Image: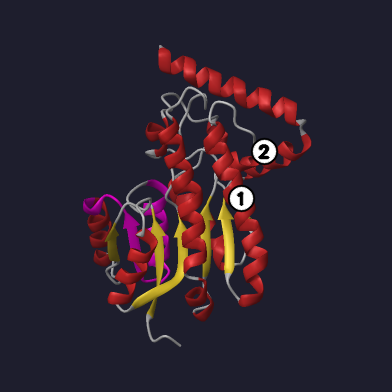
């Protein structure tokens, strides 16, 4: 045993699903380390969690895509006498628009955060996750089940998250480490504004609040589920995706994203 106290590391903890995940983990007795760029928001969240009677979370304000960020997180935790029991990879963003028309550097930055950083954090702390019988919760998306013309790079990153997480679930299960991928449908958060979505996210029946999505993710991780799709309607959609011809799915997504681009121009 290392003698370091176990904590749950949550990235992207300054808004949306990340904030909701922090609250649900704290309510269930987990000590936290909150990670994001916006230190003021992290400290406000840490104050709220402490005011509710939980231990005050460790705050790590850092840009995850900078070189050495994961090593810096590990060093900060060790300096606080802590190490990960759970890693929650929630940080990520999307961009609406045709891949050939959007800024390449922005799209590569999206791949860096959504794919490389998530992979590095998923693999960096496996020994401590094993020591504490913990696990990894990777926040994917229903987009990971689909081809995504109009958001091609984003959909592809989430397909990676789904595939990688499901495989890691099988690889780490014999070591007592749980791996769950959370694949929500549309969630009203700051994600839409960052992505450039100016109209409604999707039909209301598919949309869920951040709190209910976080609750589903937490329950799924604790019970050792491989994949969690919150909401009955969204589960039915993933079944239809497996049945419908790929050509039809491409057309349906393309039409949806075309309407979004048209809305942006008006």
Quadrant in which residue 241 is drawn: top right
Marked residue nearer the N-terminal end (2 or 1): 1
Q: Nearer the viewer, mark 2 or mark 1?
A: 1
Q: Quick one: quadrant of the C terminus?
A: top left
Q: Residue tagged by mark 2?
A: 237
Q: Which mark is residue 162?
A: 1
Residue 35: tell me if it is visible.
Answer: yes
Quadrant in which residue 194 is drawn: top left
Instruction: Label 2, secondary structure: give it.
Output: helix
Residue that appears at 27% across and 62% down:
59
Left or right of 41 in this view: 206: right
Relative image position of residue 67 (x, y in whole percent): 36, 55
Relative image position of residue 92 (x, y in whole percent): 44, 46
- Range drawn in magenta: 16-40
Left or right of 132 in this view: 180: right
Q: Residue furthest top?
A: 266
Residue that appears at 46% across and 44% down:
209
Position of 162 relative to 124 (above/below): above
Residue that appears at 26% across and 50% down:
38
* Alpha-carbon span between mark 2 and mark 1: 16 Å
Q: Which mark is residue 149?
A: none
Relative image position of residue 133 (x, y in whole percent): 53, 77
């Amino acid at each position: 045993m290392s003698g370091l106290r176990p904590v749950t590391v949550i990235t992207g903890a300054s808004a949306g699903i990340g904030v909701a995940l922090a609250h649900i983990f704290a309510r269930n007795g987990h000590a936290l380390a909150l990670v994001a760029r916006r230190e003021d928001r992290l400290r406000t969240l840490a104050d709220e969690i402490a005011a509710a009677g939980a231990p005050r979370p460790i705050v790590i304000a850092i840009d995850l895509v900078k070189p050495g960020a994961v090593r810096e997180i590990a060093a900060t935790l060790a300096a606080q006498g802590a190490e990960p029991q759970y890693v929650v990879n929630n940080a990520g963003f999307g961009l609406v628009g045709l891949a050939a028309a959007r800024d390449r550097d922005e799209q590569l930055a999206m791949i860096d955060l959504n794919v490389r950083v998530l992979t590095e954090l998923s693999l960096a702390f496996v020994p401590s996750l094993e020591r504490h019988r913990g696990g990894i919760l990777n926040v994917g998306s229903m987009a990971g089940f689909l081809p995504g013309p109009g958001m091609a790079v984003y959909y592809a990153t989430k397909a990676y998250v789904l595939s990688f997480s499901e495989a890691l679930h099988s690889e780490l299960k014999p070591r007592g480490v749980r791996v769950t991928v959370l694949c929500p449908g549309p969630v009203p958060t700051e994600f839409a504004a960052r992505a450039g979505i100016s109209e409604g996210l999707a039909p209301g029946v598919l949309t869920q609040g951040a709190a209910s999505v976080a609750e589903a993710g937490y329950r799924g991780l604790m019970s050792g589920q491989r994949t969690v799709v919150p909401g009955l309607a969204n589960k039915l959609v993933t079944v239809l995706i497996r049945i419908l011809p790929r050509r039809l799915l491409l057309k349906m997504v393309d039409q949806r994203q075309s309407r979004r681009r048209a809305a942006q121009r008006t």
